[in-house]
Amino acid sequence: MTIGLVKESMDLESRVALVPDDVALIVQKGVEVLVENNAGANSGYSNEAYESVGAKIVDSKTAWGQDLVVKCKEPLEHEYHLLKEKATLFSYLDLAYQKSLCEMFINKKITSICTETIAGPKNDYPILAPMSVVAGRLAAHLVQHYLLALEHVKGFMGKGVMLGGLSGAQRAKIVVVGGGVVGMESAKVLSQMGAKVTILELDYAKLQNHPYYHLYDLEVLSVNEANIIQALSGAVGLVGAVLVTASQTPKVILRRHLKYMQKQGVVIDVACDLGGCIETIRQTSHSNPVYVEEDLLHYGVPNMPGIVAKTSSTAYSHASVPYLLYYLEHGLKGFLKANTKIVANTLGGLSAYNGYITQEGIAKAFNLAFKSPLEVLKEL
């Protein structure tokens, strides 16, 4: 088999799905790797770095035209025609808001391995987890950035607040919605920067023994109307960090709740690519990241880790390569049945196969043909 490693084209998406060290592992297995010209350049990896480990540098059409294509983020519409029929795509996909992508998968009978929905042996989504850490920590820094007294949008100044305050000035109050990896990493960094942090979490009891809970003096509240109002009253920052795997994100913070925040505050929703948990969020881009609504600065960039490309590429590549290697050695059937200490619980990663969507929630949402991964496995 030959792998095509393609260059990302989403706005200011600078990651690459495989770094040279991991390409070397694949080449050592006798697999040819064709790397699109300058695919790794924005992550600090030159064409020569890939060639030095045995890969070949090719044009875009050639890289996309392979039986197995590897990416970080989902293909954009102008790239759909580049995938050959019955190809396999190995990538983050965020299908909950991508009907056209699902339709393309069906029409071209694409096999898609959605890396963010692979549960892994510990059910901790090992390929998604490192990007969740990056996004959570980055969200904290972005809160501080957009609180600076700069004209972030024409005619709209940041509030001019330092998260940690100082002697004689209060610390900033920040609310994080969701106590998963993204939420806890964001809360950790916000607390380290001196903010007073409240986490709103449906399953609040699970955080009782989380090491961050005591170490960073976090307040954890259950999600209900009274607690939402209490938490947001006087807050200058709000971070949405709710994820429901392979599904649209439920709305937790409604427009009417935002009136309790201080004006000129900041709203960031990390899960905006799946709809977000904040009613007023909409997708933006790194080139035009923010807009004003309800007198609050809103940030809705779907590919946040793309701007820390060196760190993110290394983390994504190292996390995903064991799964890619297993797929290459054992094929789709073996991959879906995997049950090792490193590669396991992979069924949920299959999102499309041979003209069907294989994630039920996605198929129902878009009224598309569905076949369960277990049915696919029986057919293989």
Image: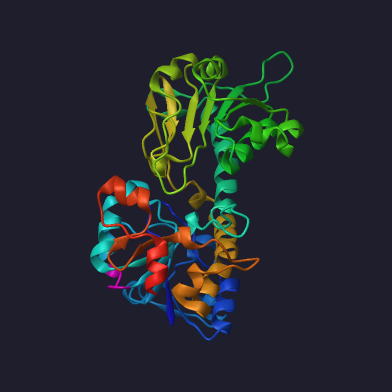
| Residue 110 screen position, x and y as percent | 32, 67
Query: For this rendering, which residue is in front, 155 or 224?
Result: 224
Which of the 4 image quarters holds residue 259?
top left
Q: Is residue 21 left or right of residue 106?
A: right
| Residue 197 screen position, x and y as percent | 64, 26
Q: Is residue 152 visible?
A: yes
> Residue at position x 29%, y 73% from top?
84
Magenta-colored span: 82-86
Q: Is residue 373 left or right of residue 104?
A: right
> Residue at position x 56%, y 83% from top?
29
84 falls in the magenta region: yes
Query: For this rendering, which residue is in front, 272 or 359?
Result: 359
> Residue at position x 44%, y 73% from top?
332
* Quadrant, the C terminus: bottom left
Q: In the figure, 55 relative to 250: above or below?
A: below
Query: For this rendering, which residue is in front, 244 or 157?
Result: 244
